[in-house]
Image (tube, grey):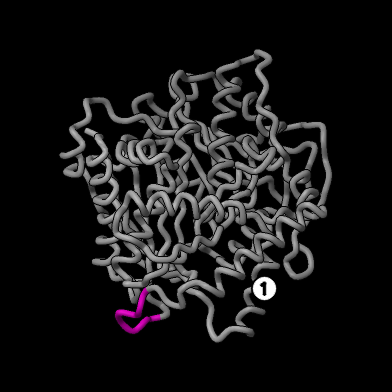
Amino acid sequence: MSESHELDLLDLPVSAGRAGRGPATWGQQAIWDAVSVLGEDAPRYNVSVGFPLDPAYPRAAVLAALARAAGHHEALRTRMVPGADGELTQVLDASGHFPVVIRRCAAEESATVGDALLAELASQAFDCAEQWPLRIGLVEADGLVRHYAMVLSHTAADGGGLRRLARDVVMLLAAGTGNAGLPPATQPLDLAAYQVSERGRRRDEAARRHWRSRLGDGPRALFAPRVPRDPQALFPNACLRSPALLRSVDHVAAARGVSGSSVLLAAATQQIGRLSGAPDVLLQVVVNNRFLPGMAQTVTTLAQEGLFHLRSVEQDFGALVGRVHAGALGTYRHASYDKRLLDRDIEELRGELPDLADHSCFFNDTREPALFRPPAPAGSPVPLSRAREQTTLTWPVEFPPRHNLTFAMDVYDAPGAVELLMTADSSLMPRADMEAFLRGIEDTVVTDALATGCR
């Protein structure tokens, strides 16, 4: 066995003060319902992150930090047990263990070995009723841990929860044996208790009213079929990697007095109008919900979709981005709800209306720059007017078809760039339209950045 393949397998024990059981949160149940029907494709919905540790740490220090993080964040010690009709009970264990895989290699190989280990751990499904929803991979070189990999079941955390957990592990490592504590965080059992309370039910009812209103008022069709649809046809996936967008989004957000997410949402909205010809636009926007009271530091599944409806998409981007920002804030307030009850409402609405508004387009800005942004490669950035020369567009993979999906676009921070990833039904959005959509977003935002003084 070569050195790069040497490994250790261990179970890291964790003991904490609280155990309990209760109903699932809205987020836990919604993710379970979505993932449980995917079969062999379920591991694709695991959430994962890997990164180098600089400085490197002894194995014992990393394991101690992990144990403290798992003691603090109860989602990591929570099993999801399905009952009748798939209704979940969350079971919090006071003690137990989670698996750690440790690979050893030469120092210069640690990043490559770490990436491979992350992919291996992420490709495996979780048994959420029997196992804790966390796997860890460590890469050691010269007796120190130099790369860290972490995979969670999506029932335990969304992207925002994953970033907070990674931040907390790094904070604990930096603190060593000091007394630095982690930020207070609402735990899943407490969140579920709020959601079944009178206040929680009122929030749920208000959110579902918002959805019903927009499904009744929104456009009936956005994209007309371009070719006959093959139910078995795979959906292509495009990735636009743009260094120019990284600078432009931040600049336009500051210049226009809006959020970076609103800048990209406005550009996406404008491209939908241009490609579809529809006067109105309706989008499901993924909202991380961590602006809700007590949720800023929480590691659990909080993100849900809000329904964003914009009437009359004007061509002037400066005017459009202000309207989008204002409308998005209303959408965000109504993105926390009981998904099973919403699905029931939608089915009832179908019986009352000849058709519902087209809600098959999805927008998800996963970035939280204040919390995490990968460092840019070394070197001086080129002027913005030339930065688009560095843009790349690739078609990395194809996915199984998804019901009620025209397209889904995700926004990611990448080292020195913003990445736009898009999956679409090519009978409604052929590859040429997908490319025009992504490049149109880039062109719109960069053009506005140049016009408002970004250089």
Where's residue 443, x and y in %?
Answer: 24, 51
Which residue is situated farthest in the front direction here?
319
In the drawing, does residue 341 fall left or right of residue 412? right
Q: What stretch is highlighted in magenta?
A: 223-230
Q: Can residue 172 be seen in this snapshot?
A: yes
Where's residue 183, x and y in %?
Answer: 66, 28
Q: Is residue 64 magenta?
A: no
| Crowd class of label 1 (few under 14; some 14 to 19; many from 20; radius 10 Å) | some
Q: Main secondary structure of the magenta part?
A: loop
Q: Nearer the viewer, residue 224 or 81?
A: 224
Please tell me in which quadrant of the rendered image residue 29 appears.
bottom right
Please name the residue that numbered disc 1 is placed on: 345
Where's residue 417, x and y in %?
Answer: 31, 39
Q: Can residue 90 be seen in this snapshot?
A: no
Please tell me in which quadrant of the rendered image residue 62 appears.
top right
Q: Residue at x 60, y 15 (%)?
A: 176
Q: Nearer the viewer, residue 449 or 9?
A: 449
Quarter of the image that includes the N terminus: top left
Specify the amino acid type for callout 1.
Asp
Q: Which residue is drawn at 56% across and 54% down?
A: 330
Q: Residue at x 55, y 68 (%)?
A: 214
Q: In what element is the residue under mark 1?
A: helix
Q: Residue at x 42, y 77 (%)?
A: 221
In the drawing, does residue 421 fall left or right of residue 41? left
Quarter of the image that includes the C terminus: top left
